[in-house]
Amino acid sequence: MTTTATTILRVYDDATPHAPLVETTDGERIASELRAIGVRFERWAAGAELPRGASQDAVIAAYRSSIDRLIDECGYQAVDVIRLERGNPNAAELRKKFLDEHRHSEDEVRFFVEGKGAFYLHAGDRVYQTVCVRGDLISVPAGTTHWFDMGPDPEFTAIRLFITPEGWVADFTGNPIAARFPKLDA
């Protein structure tokens, strides 16, 4: 998997989903805008080339030093990998699972080591669409309403960290807001 994609942040008023108030690819500006709502965003080195079909253990081994740094800093205890390659027969079902607004009981941390995906963070009357690509680390604070779009034919690998595996369980809000916003492929 290789990508030439660029990280993008679009900030919308939650009532006007097709007219971004902010659009930027500048990493420092992205980090600043997200920090203002309590979200950690950093660009890290993601230089390991993973073979097609690389196992979770192989991905974790390739990025062990980065994972250990986060574990030491934040106390995470659960680490896993979500990896989808193009043509996955379950792509539509997996995509749908995360497209509704939800929150988690603890921080949701993702380190993208291949491909891309879009986090939509709903904070106050704003929606922050953050298209994350290889090398992006994003940490969504516990309780932050959000949704995730991996696109119609996803291709990405992300390392996920939580304090406990139960922290991954989504608490859906029932708010239909996600359906109004442009998808990753738009």
Image (cartoon, grey):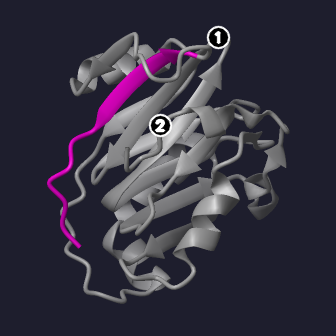
Per the image, label 2 sits on a secondary structure element best described as: loop
Left or right, 11 with respect to 102, comes to: left
Q: Check residue 57 in the rendering and tell me which mark sits there, or answer none.
A: none
Mark 1 vs mark 2, CA separation in Å: 17 Å
Left or right, 21 with respect to 133, comes to: right
Reading the image, the residue beneath label 2 is: 182
Q: Check residue 125 in the rendering and tell me which mark sits there, or answer none.
A: 1
Q: Nearer the viewer, mark 1 or mark 2?
A: 2
Judge whether 36 appears above or below 141 on screen: above
Q: Which residues are magenta?
A: 1-13
Furthest residue to the left?
Answer: 4
Per the image, label 1 sits on a secondary structure element best described as: loop
Magenta region includes residue 4: yes
Q: Residue at x 26, y 79 (%)?
A: 50
- Which is more toward the observer, 8 or 178? 178
- Which is more toward the observer, 138 or 23? 23
Q: Residue at x 36, y 27 (%)?
A: 9
Q: Position of residue 91 (x, y in %)?
A: 53, 74
Q: Is residue 162 visible?
A: yes
Magenta region includes residue 134: no
Q: Earlier in the sequence, mark 1 or mark 2?
A: 1
Left or right, 174 with respect to 14, comes to: right
- Which is more toward the observer, 144 or 89? 89
Instruction: Give amino acid for label 1.
Output: Asp
Q: Residue at x 66, y 41 (%)?
A: 107
Judge whether 177 appears above or below 147 on screen: above
Residue 80: name its quadrant: bottom right
* Other-residue count near label 2 (Cα within 10 Å), few / some / many at <14 / 14–19 / ≥20: few
Q: Residue at x 26, y 20 (%)?
A: 28
- Which is more toward the observer, 113 or 124? 124
Instruction: Give amino acid for label 2.
Output: Pro
Q: Is residue 77 visible?
A: no
